[in-house]
Image: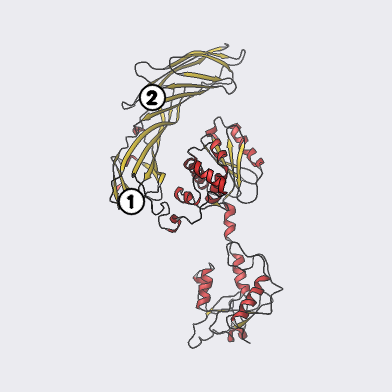
Amino acid sequence: MHLSRVQNQRALRGTAATRATPRAAGPAGWPHERSHHPAAPAHVGLGSLQVPSPSSPTQGCSHLSASGASTLSFLGFGSSAAAIFALSPRFGSAARPAPQPGGPAPLLVPAPFPLSPASLNSAQSVTLVCHHWLYARLKSRPSRTSFTTKMIHSLFLINCSGDIFLEKHWKSVVSQSVCDYFFEAQEKAADVENVPPVISTPHHYLISIYRDKLFFVSVIQTEVPPLFVIEFLHRVADTFQDYFGECSEAAIKDNVVIVYELLEEMLDNGFPLATESNILKELIKPPTILRSVVNSITGSSNVGDTLPTGQLSNIPWRRAGVKYTNNEAYFDVVEEIDAIIDKSGSTVFAEIQGVIDACIKLSGMPDLSLSFMNPRLLDDVSFHPCIRFKRWESERVLSFIPPDGNFRLISYRVSSQNLVAIPVYVKHNISFKENSSCGRFDITIGPKQNMGKTIEGITVTVHMPKVVLNMNLTPTQGSYTFDPVTKVLAWDVGKITPQKLPSLKGLVNLQSGAPKPEENPNLNIQFKIQQLAISGLKVNRLDMYGEKYKPFKGVKYITKAGKFQVRT
């Protein structure tokens, strides 16, 4: 008996109604966690034929036409599932049917059960699908959502006081008590930046970063590449900085609704989705005073109504139709010096970590080329996805179609100590007498290799021994503070003038009867030098192609201290 198309659709809907809830990302009506369907009808209509519905997984077979092959390929089984297999005992012992005149040649589907000759003879030019075989294949393949369990499960934002002021969960809720393991590691670390980035707990992994006096702590259920999570957390912090002007606790609390909207778009069920700034700004509008007033009156939200144009192009980092009245391109070359200086003034370790941050406000679709005077000194260069890597390999030129707005173009490292110039020196004399309740503290800072530039923003931080009660010091420049609880001395120096070098001298009061400290404290120094790249890197020129206007170009150089430590 032949069924009409309407009857076939009704039969299929009736069968789908007896199945379990369909997968969220799979074809509608496919079974989820059922091993059999006792309520299925005796025959399921498909095309113009009747397919016997097998009562057990060891009955039934099928032929697959060209349309069935494309169906299996669409479902993700690939072309191998639609190939013609030679008959073997595993795939049945029946003869291959001959192709029907004027119809597509049937493709035999392998099945882990004997083939029925009766059903083989009834095969015509229409696809007959054995749904038990497909279900077995579907069940044997991991679902798409199973991969997300390996990604980020929850995110906690913690301030320096140890308060969890924001949390976001993409799957089930994880208790805040999981952060106790992080707090224990934080107490063991001498400095906030020395907290281990990866912490293992009995049931989770905690992966964290420290940015702008905030901890971003993510909760992972299974092992993942830690750098994957760390990079995503930095993207989150950069997005907050771009949206709110600063990544601080106050800014996040003031824009908590937008924060949750951003996190929902950036991570889909625990897997990164949209992390480019221009795409996010089309999805969720940045906060403004006017927009906040309009939203409060009309009840609307910051979420956009249309899909971002960048997601549909081969240049997802740049939106289409960009127009500016003033076309500008600014580049900031920022280098940080990580160094360890021993008590004699010799360099134990020195390295430069550099980045080039760009602010591009150009109309249309410009194609830029940035060249350097001495690009060979750069090591371990990390690029933004917009850069053409082959051009860099062959010519050492950065060729790219830039994103719109602020972004990090490259990051690099200069590891050769011969190329790292130390811009400051420190003369120090810190001593503690045996069986005495006082000690001597004397440090002086001066310029060393600053290429004629002014060293400014100098601060000296010293973690004094626990036996220190108080410090009576006299600075020749700036001001100092000493916290008797944390035993931290902070000296704000300011600028260095070569005519009169800043110094800090005085006495240290110790606990009476306490033993002499076993070692002297280290000096942690921060400074900044404007209009200088300490590595010697210089931008040669910036060329633009694809547009006829002439943009305004600018380059700024900054050298800062990273982890700059002087041992005493």
Q: Residue furthest front?
A: 297
Res 16 label:
none
Q: How many marks?
A: 2
Q: Residue furthest bottom?
A: 101
Rendering quarter of residue 51: bottom right
Label 2 belongs to which residue?
Answer: 424
Q: Is residue 401 left or right of residue 185?
A: left
| Residue 26, position as x, y percentages in the image | 58, 65
* Circle nearer the viewer, 1 or 2: 1
Label 1 belongs to which residue?
Answer: 366
| Residue 173, position as x, y percentages in the image | 65, 48
Residue 186 drawn above or below residue 399:
above
Mark 1 neighbour density, 10 Å: few (under 14) some (14–19) many (20 or more): some
Q: Nearer the viewer, residue 564 or 102?
A: 102
Q: From the image, which quarter does the N terminus lie in? A: bottom right
Given the image, on which type of amino acid does mark 2 rest?
A: Val
Q: Circle 2 — which element?
A: strand
Rendering quarter of residue 205: top right
Residue at the image point whose x is 60% and y is 22% from the top: 485
| Residue 275, position as x, y percentages in the image | 48, 49
Residue 523 drawn above or below residue 260:
above
Q: Is residue 556 left or right of residue 45?
A: left
